[in-house]
Amino acid sequence: MTVEYDETGKIVLDHVYNQPDPIAYFSTLSKLDYSIPGEAAPVFRKVIEAWRGGAETDEVNLLDLGCSYGINAAILKHDLSMGDLYTHYAGAKLAGLSEDDLIEHDRQFYAKHLADPDLAVTGVDIAANAIDYAVQAQMLDDGFTANLETGPLPATASEAVGDANLVISTGCVGYVRQATFEKILEAGGDERPWMAHFVLRMFPYEEFEDLLAGHGYVTETLPATFRQRRFASAEERDHVLSNLSDLGLDAAGKEADGWYHANFHLSRPAEAVEAMPLREMIPH
């Protein structure tokens, strides 16, 4: 099979991102030790806890950018790990379930493991099949298909986006840019959602930080980095190391060891940062 790389040097895995079900997605990414949703979950839970404390309510509306099949929702709403999901879908693959049977199988699976019923997750992605499956299987509470880089926010999604208390992502920032952020902020109006994003180190975040600062946000970044997945090939690794070198970033102990690494950036209105700085929310 011919291996293709995108303009950033990452291997192209488009063939698994928009299938009628997530079996190929999990089967492919498990071989690359894709782990960022699991690495991100403890951080997101701390952020959710802090938001709840400030708002004095347990009900949280979360918007997941680039949600794919709702993996972040599957973990954050349930007592599940990435390992649990890999095992679940490997078993479904062996069982040869039809799409309808797999949807029902998933509904029962996620209902059994529901741990945070007050967390409502809406997903947005360009992959229509992934969104449709995640909503039908009740991994996502709601979802919509849109490319906010090139098109408007769908009217059917404006209320869900406008009601978001927290906007998260675990890999799409760098592919989505300021246009997407602007449309989300416009939908929220005066209700500025917290923005919590895991961003690969090869994608500078300063331009997003500047955009958010213009809307009254202050951005804080954890000093630790988080592993996303293993490199799929030596060529992919070399592409990334070259990108990092061009940015003046040291890959020792991180990408040089064979893994993509991401930074965590939390952007909040200044008053929220003053009330609880990131160093208090997540000691480091």
Image (cartoon, rainbow, N blue to C red):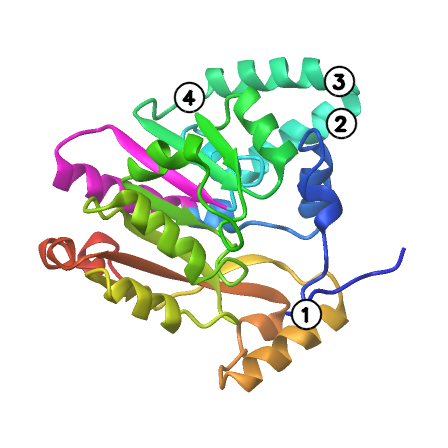
Residue range highlighted in magenta? 41-65
Quarter of the image with the C terminus is bottom left
Main SS, magenta region, reads: helix
Quadrant in the picture for residue 46: top left
Find out whether the residues at labels 3 and 4 contact each other: C-beta distance under 8 Å. Answer: no
Q: Nearer the viewer, residue 74 or 203?
A: 203
Residue bearing the label numbered 2: 93
Question: Is label 2 in a helix, a strand or a loop?
Answer: helix
Report helix, strand or loop for mark 3.
loop
Three-letter amino acid code of the residue under disc 4: Leu
Q: Is tag 3's residue or tag 4's residue first in the polypeptide sequence?
A: 3
Task: Please name the residue shown 14% across and 59% down the image.
Answer: 270
- Residue to which mark 4 is pinned: 114
Tell me the distance, in whole angstroms, between the alpha carbons under discs 2 and 4.
Answer: 23 Å
Q: Tag 1: residue type?
A: Gly
- Residue 80 visible? The answer is no
